[in-house]
Image (tube, coloured by chain):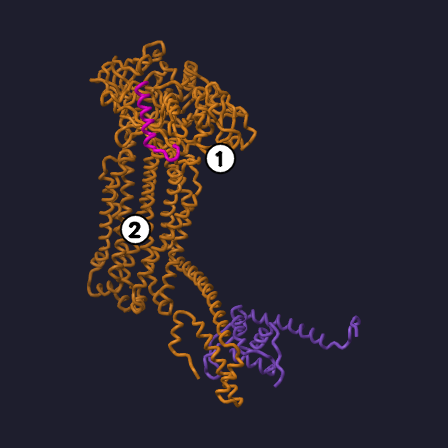
């Protein structure tokens, strides 16, 4: 088994937004897409996804509609609203710069001059 | 795989099922996950367990989701309600605009009904409800007395007849006030006041004429008032030997001095005497005189000699001229106080006027008895005079509102029928019935609110008209503040909304009472709800409208009748071609012989003007009902309370006053010659046994003041004193023999041309002789006479406009009802015609709607008859119920109503049967 990574706060929202940017999905597809894309690397309770989805729906980032799943079951499909798309864009750039900054710090090879050996 | 049971879908009938949705969504996830794990090689049971484990805390997640879902649901509902209201409003506006005539009539009739009522409320609120702006006004009591039909003292002030045949007044003598004040007993304070009439106020080189109020030293403390600036008058000011002081009313100070605080201590000349301004009264305090009378200055009562110029009256027991008010201490028995004060008054009358309760019945009955009435609103007489006109106006306004409401109901009902197909389709497409009712209510409320808003705006103008109408009953202006009262506005809003709800709900419920299939089947043809109850409801509305319009029409007819009778009244003089004005030289210090000389100088100057044929002067104003009264006694002891008029010899010629017998006065009837009089027929009939009275004598006054007059001429009876009262006994005396009692003089200038053109020349003559003497009330004698009839003519105008309005509204209502009734029967009529019915019989059958008109007219006649009994007491000439007025009003109404029924009936008869049959 691969090591699992604890989820950093706030990242779940951006992952949901990103997954929905491909088109309308129901909750289960979102969770499966995240699992498969990260190779199941994230330590995430699958159920935690749903309150997040509902919260984002209430905020107006997502809209939901009931429809039929691939196997003809009644399922709730979510899609991004314009507001959601904006959130995704803002989140992407801030997460990317955060990740880059973190990568620079962790990738540092020179000891700073003030540091004692 | 578990599936949600089918019945759960029906839960959604009442709204979204949040819990069910969350369960569905989460169960779907678990099933899909289990399936994925099974496909990965697990046994179904293990896969299920693993899916649940991976999912996490199911219960907590479910709870969170439901909570979030419900919250979202609530805000969504709010949004929906808002957007539905928006839809209703836009839809309502579109519907209203699609039938502009109907909407306009509904809005206008509501605006008129609500506007009229708002105006009346505004004025009634000011006149009848507002109290004096002083501390605890309900503790104040006003002294009155009531006596039999005669009294043997001079009276200055208004006198009224009571319902039980007595006369009542608020005037008392100065000594009586002092005695009350000395023994006030349980009265916390007692104070007196009286009006001064117009006073000449001179300051900073400018003279103005304005009203004043004489007040006792206890007046301001008794009312509990504080000074706005400086100080108010006190006991120390209220002494003859005190330095003359004056307090200005706040409004006068603002108006004339621009609110300048340095006026305190400055002098002001009041009728020629210097007074020192010591203070400004509180803003909003406008004295305790009749409603709308606001004095400019408050002067010490003790200085009445200086102000009024008629001598010191502080000891005069037989001149009753001041008003007395008191403040009852809390928790005192008013009846007990009244009883003690009454004993005091009776004792005073017996001591000073020799009139006792122990005398014969007539004498005892004539002893004035004291009563205390509420003083919370100051003097009451004018208020009481205003109650009757206000009641009449209020009645008219309520009737207009009733008509407007009935009309609104009729029109909305008819309008709703024509919309039945729209409603049917909306219900069939899934609109809930509450939703449809809300839509229809929004529409009628919208009309009502627009009508109400217009009505309030209209009331601003209408209340001004109403005050003008009321002013005609009080002679002087009514300074009533007509700012719309918040309470009145709220009342109007409530009326509008109630109207909107009630008259929107009725047609809405009518539509919804019908079963949907019937709606759909009939909706397209506009035949909806042709039910018996609906017919009956429409008929009731027609009956109501006809009855109310007929009442208003008949009332207008009766007012017209009253006015015509008034016009036919003989005032005893010829009013055409005469200019009159009034002059108060007494205010400028002229007294007695000086005053007489000046007034004759005026008279002669005026007589010399080109175009003037004669000039007369008199010490009274005819047909105003005001003037001097005295008790005249013949040698055999018979007496009469008679009107006394001072006139100069040219009075009879200038006013073309005829004499029945004897002669008029001559220039030789002056202070050196014996006293003479000309009396009228009513006077003679009450005192003398036969009509040959030339040379007979009568006397006035008592004891040493007794004077005797010889009758030189007799006048026919005429309504010279007041147009509306039976001819009063009247005695005319020569001016020159009574120069000591001259006050304000009225001049009569008869011209050969148009009298109103002479006004400037008249002013010029007066200015040449003495520029300081003010003249006022310059108008023609005909204007005077018209003014005396103003109340009747104003009422006539008001009721005529109201009646025509009601008639038009009722006809629109009738027309609409009949039109819709007929249009519902188009098929039936078409079939009947094709089966051979004559068009006339169709018209006749449609004319059956006239039955409601006739019933309404019958009710209207009975109501109008009852009403005219009430009006009889209010207005002149209402005594005989005028059959002609009732008949002509009824004929007018029935013919107009018949036309409103006939036009749509005729149109129905013109239906082409082929068109109808093709539609079937």
Q: How far apart are marks 2 and 1 (CA)?
A: 51 Å
Position of residue B648 measured from the top left corner of the image (x, y, whole percent): 36, 17
Report the quarter where the N terminus of chain B lies: bottom left
- Element type at mark 2: helix
Residue receiving disc 2: B811
Residue B548 appears in the figure: yes
Eyeballing the image, is B299 above or below B377? above
Q: Earlier in the sequence, mark 2 or mark 1?
A: 1
Residue receiving disc 1: B283
Residue at the limit of the structure toward the bottom, as seen here = B41
Eyeballing the image, is B397 above or below B80? above
Looking at the rendering, the stretch of residues picked out in magenta corresponds to B328-351
Residue B607 appears in the figure: no
Q: The purple chain is which one?
A: A
- Tell which of B770 and B32 is nearer to you: B32
Residue at left 23%, top 38%?
A: B882
Chain B, chosen colour in render? orange
| Horizontal relation, residue B784 to residue B59: left or right | left
Q: Which chain carries label 2?
A: B
**Residue B626 located within the stretch drawn in magenta:** no
- Residue density around tag 2, few if under 14, some if 14–19, many if 20 or more, within 10 Å: many
- Tell which of A106 and B254 is nearer to you: A106
């Amino acid at each position: 088994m691969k090591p699992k990574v604890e989820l950093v706060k706030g990242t779940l929202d951006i992952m949901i937004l990103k997954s929905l940017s491909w088109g309308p999905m129901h909750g289960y597809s979102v969770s499966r897409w995240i699992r498969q894309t990260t190779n199941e690397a994230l330590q995430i309770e699958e159920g935690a996804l749903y309150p997040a989805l509902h919260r984002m729906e209430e905020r107006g980032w997502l809209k939901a509609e009931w429809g039929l799943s691939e196997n003809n079951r009644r399922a709730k499909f979510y899609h991004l609203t314009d507001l959601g798309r904006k959130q995704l864009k803002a989140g992407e750039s801030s997460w990317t710069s955060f990740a880059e900054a973190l990568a620079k710090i962790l990738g540092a090879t020179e000891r700073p001059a003030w540091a004692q050996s | 795989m578990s599936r949600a049971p089918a019945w759960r879908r029906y839960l959604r009938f009442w709204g979204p099922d949040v819990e069910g949705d969350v369960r569905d969504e989460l169960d779907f996830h678990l099933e899909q996950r289990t399936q994925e794990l099974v496909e990965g090689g697990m046994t179904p049971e293990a896969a299920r367990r693993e899916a649940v484990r991976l999912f996490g805390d199911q219960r907590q997640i479910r709870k969170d989701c439901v909570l979030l879902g419900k919250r979202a649901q609530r805000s969504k509902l709010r949004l929906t309600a808002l957007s539905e209201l928006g839809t209703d409003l836009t839809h309502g506006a579109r519907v209203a605009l699609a039938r502009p005539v109907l909407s306009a009539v509904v809005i206008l009739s509501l605006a008129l009904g609500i506007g009229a009522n708002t105006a009346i409320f505004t004025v009634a609120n000011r006149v009848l409800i507002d109290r004096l702006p002083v501390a605890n006004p309900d503790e104040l009591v006003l002294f009155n007395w009531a006596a039999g039909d005669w009294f043997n003292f001079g009276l200055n002030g208004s006198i009224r007849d009571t319902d039980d045949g007595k006369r009542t007044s608020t005037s008392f003598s100065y000594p009586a006030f002092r005695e009350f004040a000395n023994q006030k007993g349980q009265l916390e304070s007692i104070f007196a006041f009286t009006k001064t009439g117009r006073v000449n106020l001179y300051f900073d080189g400018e003279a103005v004429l304005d009203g004043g109020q004489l007040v006792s030293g206890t007046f301001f403390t008794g009312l509990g008032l504080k000074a706005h600036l400086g100080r108010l008058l006190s006991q120390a000011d209220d002494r003859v030997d005190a330095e003359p002081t004056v307090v200005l009313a706040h409004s006068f100070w603002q108006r004339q001095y621009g609110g300048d605080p340095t006026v305190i201590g400055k002098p002001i000349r009041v009728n020629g005497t210097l007074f020192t301004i010591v203070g400004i009264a509180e803003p909003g305090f406008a004295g305790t005189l009749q409603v709308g009378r606001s004095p400019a200055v408050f002067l010490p009562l003790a200085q009445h000699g200086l102000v009024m110029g008629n001598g010191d009256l502080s000891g005069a027991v037989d001149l009753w001229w001041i008003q007395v008010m008191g403040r009852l201490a809390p928790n005192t028995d008013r009846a007990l106080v009244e009883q003690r004060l009454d004993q005091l008054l009776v004792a005073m009358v017996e001591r000073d006027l020799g009139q006792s309760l122990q005398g014969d019945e007539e004498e005892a009955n004539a002893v004035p008895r004291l009563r205390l009435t509420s003083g919370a609103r100051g003097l009451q007489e004018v208020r009481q005079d205003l109650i009757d006109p206000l009641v009449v106006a209020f009645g008219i306004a309520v009737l207009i509102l009733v008509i407007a409401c009935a009309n609104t109901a009729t029109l909305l009902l008819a309008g709703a029928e024509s919309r039945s197909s729209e409603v049917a389709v909306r219900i069939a497409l899934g609109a809930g019935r509450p939703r449809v009712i809300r839509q229809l209510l929004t529409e009628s409320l919208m009309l009502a609110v627009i009508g109400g808003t217009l009505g309030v705006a209209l009331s601003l103008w209408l209340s001004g008209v109403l005050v003008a109408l009321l002013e005609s009953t009080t002679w002087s202006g009514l300074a009533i503040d007509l700012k719309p009262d918040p309470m009145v506005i709220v009342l109007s809003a409530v009326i509008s909304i109630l109207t909107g709800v009630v008259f929107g709900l009725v047609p809405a419920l009518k539509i919804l009472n019908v079963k949907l299939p019937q709606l759909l089947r009939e909706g397209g043809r506009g035949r909806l709800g042709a039910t018996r109850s609906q017919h009956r409801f429409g008929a009731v509305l027609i009956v109501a409208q006809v009855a109310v319009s007929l009442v208003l029409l008949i009332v207008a007819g009766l007012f017209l009748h009253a006015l015509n009778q008034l016009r036919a009244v003989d005032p005893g003089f010829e009013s055409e071609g005469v200019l009159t004005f009034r002059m108060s030289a007494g205010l400028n210090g002229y007294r007695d012989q000086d005053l007489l000389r000046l007034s004759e100088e005026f008279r002669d100057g005026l007589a010399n003007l080109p175009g003037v044929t004669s000039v007369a002067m008199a010490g009274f104003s005819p047909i105003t009902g005001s003037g001097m009264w005295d008790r005249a006694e013949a040698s055999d002891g018979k007496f009469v309370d008679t009107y006394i008029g001072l006139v100069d010899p040219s009075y009879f010629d200038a006013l073309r006053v005829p004499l029945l017998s004897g002669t008029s006065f001559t220039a030789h009837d002056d202070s050196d010659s014996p006293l003479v009089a000309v009396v009228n027929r009513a006077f003679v009939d009450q005192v003398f046994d036969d009509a040959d009275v030339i040379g007979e004598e009568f006397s006035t006054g008592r004891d040493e003041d007794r004077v005797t007059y010889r009758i030189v001429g007799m006048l026919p009876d005429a309504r010279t004193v007041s147009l509306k009262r039976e001819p009063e006994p009247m005695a005319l005396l020569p001016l020159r023999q009574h120069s000591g009692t001259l006050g304000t003089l009225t001049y009569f200038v008869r011209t050969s041309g148009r009298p109103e053109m002479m006004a400037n020349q008249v002013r010029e003559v007066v200015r040449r002789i003495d520029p300081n003497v003010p003249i006022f009330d310059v108008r023609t004698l005909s204007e005077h006479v018209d003014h005396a009839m103003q109340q009747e003519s104003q009422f006539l105008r008001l009721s005529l406009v109201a009646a025509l309005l009601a008639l038009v509204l009722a006809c629109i209502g009738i027309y609409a009802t009949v039109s819709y009734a007929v249009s519902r029967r188009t098929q039936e009529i078409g079939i009947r015609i094709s089966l051979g019915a004559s068009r006339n019989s169709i018209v006749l059958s449609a004319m059956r709607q006239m039955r409601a008109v006739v019933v309404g007219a019958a009710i209207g006649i009975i109501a109008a008859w009852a009403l005219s009994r009430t009006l009889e007491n209010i207005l002149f000439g209402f005594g005989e119920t005028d059959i002609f007025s009732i008949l002509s009003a009824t004929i007018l109404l029935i013919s107009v109503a018949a036309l409103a029924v006939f036009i749509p009936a005729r149109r129905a008869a013109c239906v082409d049967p082929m068109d109808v049959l093709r539609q079937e």
